[in-house]
Amino acid sequence: MGKAFQEMKGSGPDHAVPKISIIQAEGANPLVRTIREKVGRNWFLCKQRRWRRPSASEVRHREKALRILDATGGTVEQVTEVEIALAKAEIGADGIGCEPASAVTLAGLKKLVKQGFVKPEESVVLVLTGHVLKDPDFT
C-alpha cells in the first residue's frame, strides 16, 4: 500500500502521500520491537532481538516497511488483547463483522490520537481486511 501511495504522489494536485502507520498486536510485534530499539532515526541499524534467524523474505518486508514509515512520517504502535476486543466490539456495534487482527487498526488509532500523533481533525482511513468468519469464536 505504501508503494502504491508513493507512486500516486504527484499524479494530481490532491495526491499527497499520507502518513502510514502500522499497528501490531502486543504478542506479535516484531516491527514495533525493531523500531523501539532503533539507534536514533536510522532504523536500518536496529538491533532486534532474534529468537530465530529471519528469512530473506522477512528481512526484505521489514526493510520495505521501515522505508515507508520513514518516507511518510508514519509510526508503529502495539495494542493489547483487551484493546483489540474493545475495538472489535465497537466495529461490530456498527454492523461490521471483522476478525480480531483487523480490529487492531481501530485500537491503534485510539492510542495514536491519545498520544497526539493523530490530531482529532485529521482524516484517517483504517484498513480492515479480515472478515468475522476468520475467527468466529473470538468475543
Image: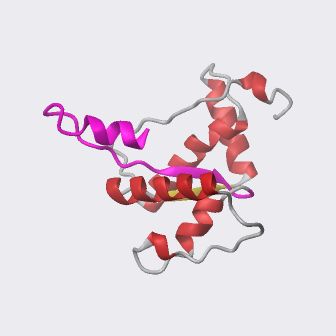
Q: Residue at x 66, y 58 (%)?
A: 29
Find residue 60 and report its horizontal and vertical position in percent.
54, 55
User: Seen in the image, is 109 located left or right of residue 25?
Assistant: left
User: Seen in the image, is 30 located left or right of residue 123?
Assistant: right
Find residue 88 and report its horizontal and vertical position in percent.
68, 35
User: Seen in the image, is 121 located left or right of residue 107?
Assistant: left
Q: Residue furthest left?
A: 13
Query: Which image quadrant is residue 84 in?
Result: top right
Any part of residue 94 in sight: yes
Q: Residue at x 41, y 74 (%)?
A: 42
**100 is higher (above) or lower (below) than 32:** above
Q: Residue furthest top?
A: 95
Find residue 113 and report its horizontal and vertical position in percent.
45, 53
Q: Please tell me which residue lies in front, 93 or 128.
A: 128
Q: Which residues are magenta?
A: 1-27
Magenta run includes residue 21: yes
